[in-house]
Image: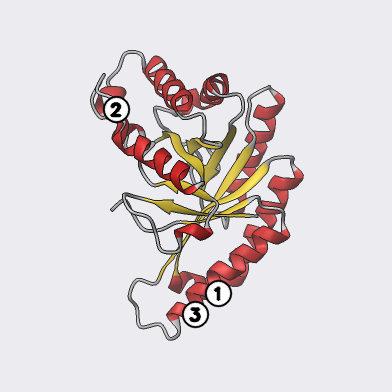
Amino acid sequence: MLLGTSVGRTTPENFDKYQIVTPHNAFKIMHIVEFENEWKWELPDRFVNLCETWGKKPRGHCLLWHRNLPDWVLQSDDIEGVLKNFVQTLVSRYPRVYAWDVVNEPMADNGDFRFSPITPYIEKAFHWAHEANPDAQLFVNDYRPTLTHKWDSLLSWCQEAKDRGVPIHGIGVQHHHRLRKVLVEGVLGWKQSRAIAKKIVEAGFICEFTENSVVDEGLPIPNAEQLTQNFYRSLENIARDEGVSSFTYWRGHLD
C-alpha cells in the first residue's frame, strides 16, 4: 500500500516518506479559471513540478465538485461545453497525474445525487477524462463511510455505470473526523470503513483512502496526541487488510 500526503503551498514534514501527493486546491476550477478565458497555471504547474523534483506520484483532485464553481461557469449558456473543456484541458496538460478524482462528493447523505449544476455531466466527465488520458485511473471520491445507505447507493451506481461502459476505475473514501467523535464512535466507524473497503475491492474497483484527518479541536482530552496516532494506525491497518491501494494523510488547508 502506498502512503500519500496532501500539500498546499508548502510541503509537510517527512515529505520524503510519501510516495503519492495530492494538492488541496491547485487543480480546482476556481483556482485555475476563476474568470472566463483567464487560465492561471502557476499553482498546478508548481505542484506537478514539485512531484517531479521529489520523484512522487501526483494525484489529481478534483475535476468536478459541486462547491467553488466560478460564477461565470454557473451563468454560462453552455455549462457542458465549459466543463468538458476544463476537464480535457487539465487532464491533457498533466499526463503524469496517475489518478483523477473525476467527481468529488457527488452523493448527499440520503444516498441520492446532489442537486447540483455538475450532476447531469458526471458520467460524461469520466468519458472526457478518459479521452484526454486513457492511462489515468479515474475515481469517484466521497466521505462519511459510516453512512451505510449512502455508500451502498454510491457503489451500486458505480457498478451500473461501469456496466454501461463508463470508465470508472476506482472509488476514494474520505475519513475526516473530530477526536471527540472518534472516542464515541470509533469501533462502529472502523467496522463500517472496513466493510466499505471490502465491498469496493470485491466489486472490482480500486479502493483508495484518499483523505484521512482527525482534528482534536484543542479540547482538554487526555492523551489526545496518542489517540490521534491510534486513529491513523487503525485506519492504516484496515486499509492494508482490505487491499486498499493507497492511504493519504490530509494536512490542513492551503497555506
The answer, for residue 113, to whether it is visible in the render is no
Q: Residues within 10 Å of mark 1 (few under 14, many from 20)?
A: few
Q: Where residue 196 appears, x then y in whole percent?
A: 66, 52
Ranked by sequence position, the earlier of labels 2 and 1 is 2
Kind of residue at badge 2: Val
Kind of residue at badge 3: Gln
**For residue 50, what is the image quadrant?**
top left
Tell me what residue is drawn at x 64 percent, y 47 percent.
207
Kind of residue at badge 1: Asn
Tell me what residue is drawn at x 44 percent, y 19 percent.
84
Report the side of 49 relative to 194 (left or right).
Answer: left
Report the side of 255 relative to 5 (left or right).
Answer: left
Q: CA distance from mark 3 to mark 2?
A: 42 Å
The residue pinned by badge 1 equals: 230
Question: Is label 2 in a helix, a strand or a loop?
Answer: loop
The residue pinned by badge 3 equals: 226
Q: CA distance from mark 1 to mark 3?
A: 6 Å
Vertical side of 194 occupied by 217: above or below: below
Q: Are marks 1 and 3 in contact (CB under 8 Å)?
A: yes
Q: Where residue 33 appears, x then y in whole percent?
A: 29, 27
The residue pinned by badge 2 equals: 33
The answer, for residue 34, to whether it is visible in the render is yes
Tell me what residue is drawn at x 76 percent, y 46 percent.
202
Q: How is the image coloured?
A: secondary structure
Q: Where residue 157 appears, x then y in whole percent?
A: 63, 34
The foreground one among 62 and 150 is 62
Ranked by sequence position, the earlier of labels 3 and 2 is 2
Q: Where residue 38 appears, x then y in whole percent?
A: 24, 23
Tell me what residue is drawn at x 28 percent, y 29 percent.
40
